[in-house]
Image (cartoon, rainbow, N blue to C red):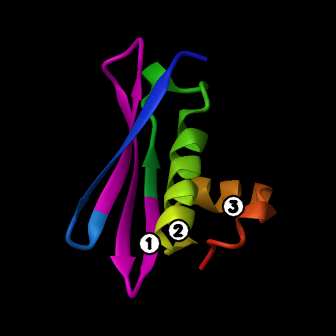
């Protein structure tokens, strides 16, 4: 897989993780809204140009790692994030 760099952007109670793929100008995004210390992962988007490279999973993994490091819970709302959490019971420590 080509290199993927994930950055986090946040403002007030909203934010997103953005995946930058080394060989493309397209970016993937996982957006969230925070309410009472819980980050509701509400949308994941990976354009076709960078699809089928594991980018969406890398975005979810970044959110899980961030939740562990910064002590918040994740509420999967987006169907992709729900499916990812269901495949990874080891993430239940951060699941709201």
- In the rendered image, residue 25, in percent from the top left (x then y), is placed at 31, 19
Q: Mark 1 or mark 3: name the one nearer the start of the chain.
A: 1
Find out whether residue 1 is within the magenta segment. no
Q: Decide which of tag 1 and tag 2 comes sooner along the chain.
A: 1
Which percent across, then down, holds residue 12?
A: 20, 71
Q: Position of residue 13 (x, y in %)?
A: 26, 73
Using the rendered view, name the quadrant where residue 36 is placed.
Answer: bottom left
Q: Quadrant for residue 24, please give it.
A: top left
- On the rendered image, what quadrant is the C terminus found in? bottom right
Q: Decide whether the magenta segment is chiefly helix, strand or loop.
A: strand
Please report the residue visible at 61 percent of the width from the left and 26 percent of the height from the top: 52
47 lies above or below 56: above
In the structure shown, which secondary structural element does the residue marked by tag 2 occupy?
Answer: loop
Q: How far apart are marks 2 and 3 (CA)?
A: 11 Å
Q: Where is residue 80 in the image (x, y as percent from the top left)?
A: 59, 53
Q: Residue furthest top?
A: 23
In the rendered structure, find residue 39 and report the number of the disc placed on it. Answer: 1
Report the residue that reaches farthest toward the front.
69
Q: Mark 3 points at which residue?
A: 85
Q: Which residue lies furthest to the bottom in this view?
A: 36
- Region rendered in magenta: 15-42
How busy is the neighbourhood of tag 1: few (under 14 within 10 Å), some, or many (20 plus)?
Answer: many
Q: In this view, does 26 lie above or below 29?
A: above
Q: Does the magenta stretch include residue 29?
A: yes
Q: Is 9 on the left or on the right of 71, as rendered?
A: left
Residue for badge 2: 77
Identify which residue, 93 or 18, lies in the foreground.
Answer: 93
Residue at 53% in and 68% down: 77
């Amino acid at each position: 897989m080509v290199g993927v760099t994930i950055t986090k952007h946040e403002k007030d109670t909203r934010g997103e993780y953005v995946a930058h793929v080394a060989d493309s100008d397209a970016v993937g995004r996982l957006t969230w809204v925070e309410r009472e210390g819980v980050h509701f992962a509400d949308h994941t988007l990976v354009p076709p140009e960078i699809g089928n490279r594991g980018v969406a999973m890398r975005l979810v993994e970044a959110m899980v790692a961030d939740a562990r490091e910064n002590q918040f819970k994740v509420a999967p709302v987006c169907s992709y994030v729900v499916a990812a959490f269901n495949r990874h019971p080891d993430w239940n420590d951060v699941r709201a």
